[in-house]
């Protein structure tokens, strides 16, 4: 079941993985592949999959689909057939 505010939940989770000074600059369009290591990105994808009840295939784990919070949400919603908002 989708979260009522998945962007806020993802932002909070991403923020928990960052240094405090990086948190202040975090936006929905921040490049997560620059801010986080690959394992953190994979963990965040797991959270996204759990919140939306979707599965991302290995070939989908690319910055074009998952490089920002906004892209992650849009990719998950597209898997559900929902508008990207």
Image (cartoon, rainbow, N blue to C red):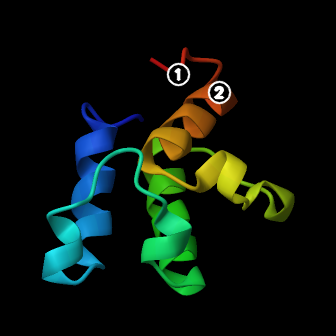
x, y (%) of residue 19? Answer: 22, 84
- How many numbered circles does the render carry? 2
Q: Quadrant of the N terminus?
A: top left
Q: Nearer the viewer, residue 12 or 56?
A: 12
Q: Nearer the viewer, residue 77 or 33?
A: 33
In the image, residue 26 above or below residue 15: above
Q: Is residue 55 visible?
A: no
Q: Are marks 2 and 1 in contact (CB under 8 Å)?
A: yes
Q: Is residue 60 visible?
A: yes
User: Residue 13: which numbered mark, if any?
Assistant: none
Neighbor class of circle 2 (other Cα within 10 Å; few <14, some 14-19, many 20+) is: few
Q: Is residue 27 left or right of residue 34?
A: left
Which residue in the rendered view is the most extreme toward the right? 59
Say which residue appears at 81% left-offset and 65% top-offset: 58
User: Residue 78: which numbered mark, if any?
Assistant: 2
In the image, residue 63 above or below residue 37: above
x, y (%) of residue 78? Answer: 65, 27
Rounded to the nearest angstrom, the CA distance separating label 2 from label 1 is 7 Å
Tag 1, which secondary structure? loop
Disc 1 target residue: 84
Neighbor class of circle 1 (other Cα within 10 Å; few <14, some 14-19, many 20+) is: few
Tag 2, which secondary structure? helix
In the image, residue 62 above or below residue 33: above
Does label 2 or label 1 sit earlier along the sequence?
Answer: 2
């Amino acid at each position: 079941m989708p979260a009522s505010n998945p962007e806020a939940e993802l932002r909070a989770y991403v923020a928990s993985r960052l240094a405090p000074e990086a948190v202040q600059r975090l936006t929905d369009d921040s490049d997560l592949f620059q801010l986080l290591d690959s394992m953190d990105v994979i963990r965040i994808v797991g959270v996204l999959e759990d919140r939306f009840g979707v599965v991302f295939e290995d070939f989908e784990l690319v910055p074009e689909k998952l490089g920002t919070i906004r892209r992650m949400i849009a990719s998950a919603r597209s898997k559900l057939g929902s508008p990207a908002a």
